[in-house]
Amino acid sequence: MPKLGSEEWSGLAMLVVSVAVAGPVLFDVVQTTIPRGWWITLFTLLIVALLVAAVSERPTRLRYIAYATTVVSSWVVVLTAPNMGLLPVLLVVTAAVGAYIIPLRLGFVVVGLNTAVLAFGIVQQADPVTEAMISAGFYLLIQLAALLGSVALIREQRMRRELTEAHIDLQAATVLLSESARTTERLRISRDLHDLIGHQLTVLTLELETARHRDGERAGEHIERANFVARELLADVRATVGELRAEPPDLTQALGEVVRNLPGLDVWVDVDAGVRIGEQQTTALVRTVQEVVTNTIRHGDARELWIEVSADETGVILTAVDDGRGASDLVPGNGLRGLTERIEALGGDVTYGGKAGFMVTARVPAT
C-alpha cells in the first residue's frame, strides 16, 4: 500500500469535512428548498467534480471543467439549504483547491463570487443585513486564508523540489569530479613510475648486463644476483602500473553518494558484486541515476525508488523503478532524450515506461 503524504492526508481531511458539514441535510435533519433527492444528487456531483479536479495530474480542459462544476454546484448546494449551518465550509474548500488549478488572480475572483453568493443566501433567510455582512466577512477571511495558505504550500513544495534537484545535480557533479580526479591521479602515478623508476631500472639492468661479462668470478656472481633483483623490481613496477590503470571505479559508492539524503524520497541501491565497468560507463550510469531521481521527484509523486545494477554476458544493466503514478502516454523530454543519447553513444540502449510506477532500464556494454 502506497504511503500517504501530507497532501494526501489533507485531501482526505477536506473530503471528510465536506461530507460532515452536509450531514444534517443528508440525514434529513435540515430541509432544502428543492427535493432532497435532487439536493443529494447535486452534492454528489460536487464531491465527484472536486475529486476529479484535485487528482488530475496537470491542468487540462477536463480539470478546469470539473473545478467550474465544483464551484457552481457548491453555490447551488449552499443556496438551496436555508438553514445552511456549516455548509459555507464547502465554499472554503473550493477556494483552497482552486490554488492548485487556476491562477491566483482567478482564485480571488472565486473567493469574491463565493462571498457574494453566501451574502445573498443569508439575506434570503430574512436575516439582518448587518448579520449577513458579518457572516459573509467571516467566511471571506477564512477563504482568503485557505487560498493563500494553499498558495504558500505550493510555493514551498516547488522550492523544496528545486532545492532537491539542485542537491542531486551537485552530488552527481561531486561524484564525477572525484572519480575524474582519482583517474587523473592514477594516470599521473603510472606515468611517473614508468618514466622515472622504470627508466632508471632499465638503464641499471643494461649496465649490470654489461658488467657481467667482465673478468672476476666473484664479481660476476654478485652482478648476476643484482641483475636478477633489478629485473624482478622492474617487473613489479610494471605490474603496479598495470593495476593502477585497471583499478575499477567504486560504482556502489558513486551511486550511493548521488541518492544520499533526499528529502521525501527513500532510495535503495543494489549493485551486484560482479559488476566491473570503466570510467565512461560509470559516468553514464551516474548521469542515468541523476536523471531518474530528478524525474521521480519532479513528476513521479513517488515515495520510494529502487535501483539495481547487475551484469550478464551482454554488459551491465541498470534498472530503476518507483512507486509513483507512472506514465501510460509518455512524451520524452530533454532529460530522457539526453539520457538515451548518452547510453547509445556507448553502444547501449534505454527503455522506459510503466503505468503502475515508472521504470527505466539502461544497458551498457561490458568493458
Image (cartoon, grey):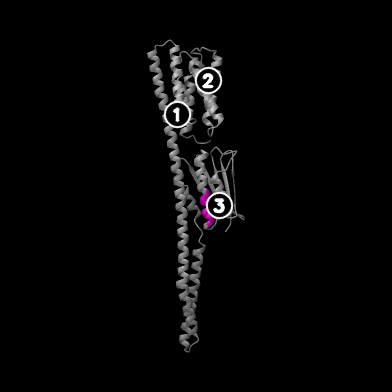
Picture residue at 41% right of the left edge, 30% below the top: 149
Describe the element under mark 1 as helix, strand or loop: helix
| Type of the residue with mark 2 | Phe
Residue 62 seen in the figure: yes
| Type of the residue with mark 1 | Arg
**Magenta stretch mostly in which secondary structure?**
helix
**Distance of label 2 from label 3 (alpha carbons):** 53 Å
- The answer to which image quadrant residue 96 occupies is top left
Describe the element under mark 3 as helix, strand or loop: helix
Q: Are circles 2 and 3 on residues that touch, CB within 8 Å?
A: no
- Of the numbered discs 1 and 2, the one sitting upstream in the chain is 2
Picture residue at 43% right of the left edge, 20% below the top: 115
- Quarter of the figure with the C terminus: bottom right
- Of the numbered discs 1 and 3, the one sitting upstream in the chain is 1
Residue matched to label 1 = 105
Residue matched to label 2 = 43
Instruction: Please give the range of residues in magenta.
Output: 280-288
- Of the numbered discs 2 and 3, the one sitting upstream in the chain is 2
In this view, the residue in front, 322 or 292, is 292
Q: Is residue 98 above or below residue 339?
A: above
Percent coordinates x, y for residue 262 in the rendering: 45, 44
Percent coordinates x, y for residue 165 in the rendering: 46, 44
Q: Is residue 98 above or below residue 317?
A: above
Q: Which residue in the rendered view is the most extreme toward the bottom?
A: 215
In this view, the residue in front, 166 or 183, is 166
**Distance of label 1 from label 2 (alpha carbons):** 27 Å
Q: Residues within 10 Å of mark 2 (few under 14, many from 20)?
A: many
Q: Residues within 10 Å of mark 3 (few under 14, many from 20)?
A: many
Residue matched to label 3 = 342
Percent coordinates x, y for residue 344 in the rendering: 59, 52
